[in-house]
Image (cartoon, helix red, strand yellow):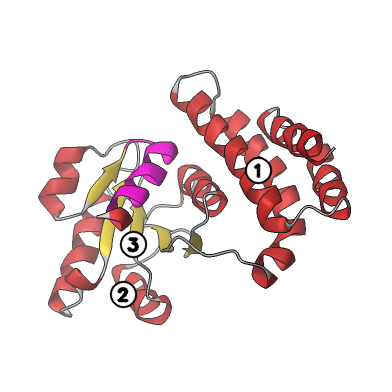
Amino acid sequence: MSAELLNELRTAIVEMRFDDTEGLARRALEAGVKAVDVLNGACLPALDEVGVLFREGDYFLPDVLMSVRAYNSAYRLLLPGLKEGAYESRGRVMLGTVEGDIHEIGKNILHALLQGNGFDVVDLGVNVSPAVFLEKAKEHKPDIIGMSALLTTTMPVMKETIELFEKEGLKDSFRFIVGGSPLNQRFSDEIGADGYGEDAQSGVELVRRLLAS
């Protein structure tokens, strides 16, 4: 019964049935399944599958966003149980779209996928200045700082942010990753970032690799 419920919840997330996922998560909890097991047995595999479908071109951004919405409906119900149980964060990631840029779809997808994969995420939103990245890094002490940009005119802010951390003597206290459609690995290397994510799913894999190294 529990296995069937978890499988049904996983399928509902993948199929973007956001009206069903909260009810399925509630039924699983009422059946005695721990919140962490619902997360690991249904929600995380579902987001992994969605990430693969997106990468392979079977899903597009609207599909991913609806799947994330379906995931969030279940996750909100699980969160109190996760905080009480044996859930252990895999690390903390701080995300923000750099100053001058208000695009955040890609960042929001990465946020959801990271959260679904067991990472704590601090989302600074959009139009984030280098000074705010620095201030919030001191406050939240993330393992990784992720910067997003969709405009070529705002890409230099990523370099300015890393240079500010260098000036403050804090560059080596954090790992920096960058992402966004106009970026590439060469740009990441040139500005001294620790990695470049081509899309949200590769961003999750990049975070995993960096924290494992």
Q: Nearer the viewer, residue 35 or 73?
A: 35
Residue 208 sits inside the magenta stretch: yes
Residue at image coords 83%, 38%: 20
Residue at image coords 72%, 57%: 35
How many callouts does the rendering have?
3
Q: Position of residue 86 (x, y in %)?
A: 61, 66
Check whether the beta carbons of the residues at disc 3 and disc 1 lie within 8 A of each other. no
Return the residue at label 2.
134
Q: Which numbered circle lies on residue 41?
A: 1
Look at label 1 and name its amino acid: Gly
- For the residues labelled 3 and 1, the Cα–Cα distance comes to 26 Å
Tell me which segment is drawn in magenta.
198-210
Q: Position of residue 95 (x, y in %)?
A: 42, 59
- In the displayed structure, 63 sits above or below 115; it is above
Q: Is residue 164 visible?
A: no
Label 3 or label 1, whichever comes before in sequence order: 1
Residue at image coords 57%, 49%: 116
Answer with left or right where residue 110 lies relative to residue 158.
right
- For the residues labelled 3 and 2, the Cα–Cα distance comes to 12 Å
